[in-house]
Each structure stands twice: as structure tokens, then as C-alpha cells.
């Protein structure tokens, strides 16, 4: 064992390690804090165009900057991940990834945006077009602690973002995708429970509602960068940077 005190110190002898400086042990420490995800990627070539792909150490995806595609491990090989992004003319601080999920919901009416407004008793007028707008769940595709994850998911789901989408990942800074779709899907019932009014209905909902996810799309939404947070003004949503850092070790 070693520890750092103006250099590397042998914890058993309690003496400074004479040579080498702090660099090697720092490298080791960094390695040790890398979260142990079930899937680890090695640098790989794009299955579509053969270009070198990129991915952050804790990411579940690899991206090809040559043909603008995103890939994930699936059954022992790389499969293309359907994704899109909402473009923005303003300078983007960070594109944050979300799983946009369409699901069949039984036990409560949640087919359209209008259904959501009624179920959640949102202070909005049900305009005619909203009956035809498909309802989507929106879950962060990045790690947050469970409570923040749920509040963020219900906030974005409540907003039902409707910005026009461009296929493919955005050019620019992107938050790593490190929340698996399978875990996001497990939270869908809890998201409904957070919405439902009156609150007494929560138990009933958890017991009777069934949800079958049908279709998903990874959508990058543009956030502006503040000192301590990433901000989506239209949705009035702030995601604090320190929560993203801490969540890496969840
Ligand atoms: Zn490619």
C-alpha cells in the first residue's frame, strides 16, 4: 500500500518512495476508480466504414466520426444504435443523451401527449394536435443517482420535447452514454407514479399498470454550459456537473 504526501509514500515503511515520483501510482489510482461496467470496449473499427471508433472509458457506445454512426455491443458483436439529435443554432455546451421510449401502457391512458396532461393534471390546455402526438418516455442515458435519475426522467417526460430531430449523433461535445437502456426501462412505472395525480393513486398504479416497451431512440438534446451545471432553458432543466461525476462511481 502507498499513499500520497508530497510524493509517493510507502504506507508500511512510512517512508517516501525514493524514485519514480507520483506519476505511476496516479495512473494506477485512476485505473482503480474506473467503474466496472459489464461490457468493456477495446478500440475498434467501424463495421460500416472501417474508421477508428471512439468511446469514453465508461461509455456503453462507440462512435464513428467518419460516417456519423453510434454502435453498441449486442450478442457479442457491434450493432448500430439508432440515434438522433435536436439541432440548435446557439453554441452548445454539451449534448446530453436520453432514451426516448415508446411503450404500450395498460391500466392508465398514456397514448398521447394529451393523455399525459390529463393523467398528470398538468397546468396546460389540451390543444387539438396533442391528441395525435405520441407519448414518449424520456430517460437519461447517463448515470445519475436513482433519485435524480427519476426526477430528471419525469421532468423531461413531462416536457415531451418536440424539437425537430436530425438522424445520427451530433457533432460536438457529448455526454457519455453509460446508463443501459435495460435499466432505464425498469424505471418507467416509477415515472408514471411520479406523475399521477391525485397522489393516492400511486399504489393503485404500481399494482395495476403494465408497460411493454416497443421502440426506442437515443436522442441527444442540446444543453448550454454554466459554471456548475448544464442547462436546457426551454425545459427549465439544470443538470449539475458534480452529480455526473459522482454518478460515474454508482
Ligand atoms: Zn464509420
Image: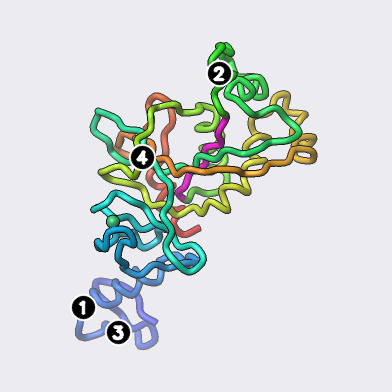
What coloring was used for the rendering?
rainbow
- Residue depth check, mark 4 versus mark 1: number of the one nearer the observer: 4
**Residue 79 shown in magenta:** no
Can you tell which mark lies on residue 21?
Answer: 1
Q: Nearer the viewer, mark 3 or mark 4?
A: 4
Residue 38 drawn at (x, y percent): 50, 67
Sooner in the amino-acid sequence: mark 3 or mark 4: 3
Determine the residue positioned at 48% across, 65% down: 37
Confirm whether the magenta stretch covers residue 136. Answer: yes
Asked if residue 220 is positioned above or below residue 113 in the image, the reply reads below
Residue at numbered disc 4: 167
Is residue 73 shown left or right of residue 191?
left
Q: How far, Cα to Cα, is label 1 from label 3?
A: 13 Å
Span highlighted in magenta in the image: 135-142
Give how far apart the Cα atoms at labels 2 and 4 are.
Answer: 24 Å
Q: Name the residue: 47% across, 43% down.
A: 217
Q: Secondary structure at mark 4?
A: strand
| Mark 2 vs 4, N-terminal side | 2
Q: Secondary structure at mark 1?
A: loop
Q: Earlier in the sequence, mark 3 or mark 2?
A: 3
The residue identified by callout 2 is: 130
Name the side, left or right, on which 174 lies relative to 138. Answer: left
Residue 12 appears anywhere in the view: yes
**Image coordinates for residue 52, horizontal then vertical, percent:** 25, 63
Rendered image: mark on residue 237:
none
Residue for badge 3: 15
* The N terminus, quarter of image: bottom left
Amino acid at each position: 500500500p502507498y499513499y500520497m504526501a508530497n510524493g509517493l509514500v510507502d504506507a508500511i515503511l512510512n517512508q517516501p518512495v525514493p524514485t519514480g515520483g507520483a506519476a505511476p501510482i496516479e495512473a494506477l489510482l485512476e485505473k482503480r476508480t474506473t467503474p466496472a461496467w459489464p461490457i468493456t470496449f477495446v478500440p475498434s473499427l467501424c463495421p460500416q466504414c472501417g474508421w477508428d471508433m471512439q468511446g469514453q472509458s465508461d461509455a456503453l457506445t462507440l462512435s464513428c466520426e467518419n460516417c456519423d454512426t453510434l454502435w453498441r455491443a449486442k450478442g457479442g458483436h457491434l450493432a448500430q444504435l439508432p440515434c438522433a439529435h435536436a439541432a440548435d443554432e446557439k453554441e452548445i455546451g454539451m449534448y446530453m443523451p436520453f432514451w426516448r421510449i415508446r411503450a404500450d401502457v395498460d391500466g392508465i391512458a398514456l397514448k398521447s401527449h394529451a393523455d399525459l396532461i390529463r393523467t398528470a393534471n398538468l397546468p396546460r390546455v389540451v390543444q387539438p394536435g396533442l391528441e395525435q402526438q405520441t407519448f414518449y418516455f424520456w430517460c437519461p442515458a447517463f448515470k445519475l443517482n436513482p433519485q435524480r435519475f427519476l426526477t430528471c426522467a419525469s421532468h423531461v417526460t413531462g416536457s415531451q420535447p418536440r424539437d425537430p430531430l436530425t438522424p445520427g449523433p451530433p457533432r460536438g461535445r457529448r455526454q457519455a452514454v453509460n446508463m443501459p437502456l435495460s435499466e432505464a426501462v425498469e424505471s418507467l412505472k416509477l415515472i408514471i407514479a411520479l406523475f399521477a395525480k391525485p397522489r393516492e393513486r400511486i399504489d393503485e398504479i404500481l399494482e395495476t399498470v403494465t408497460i411493454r416497451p416497443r421502440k426506442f431512440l437515443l436522442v441527444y438534446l442540446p444543453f448550454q454550459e454554466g459554471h456548475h451545471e448544464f442547462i436546457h432553458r426551454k425545459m427549465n432543466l439544470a443538470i449539475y456537473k458534480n452529480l455526473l461525476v459522482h454518478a460515474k462511481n454508482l
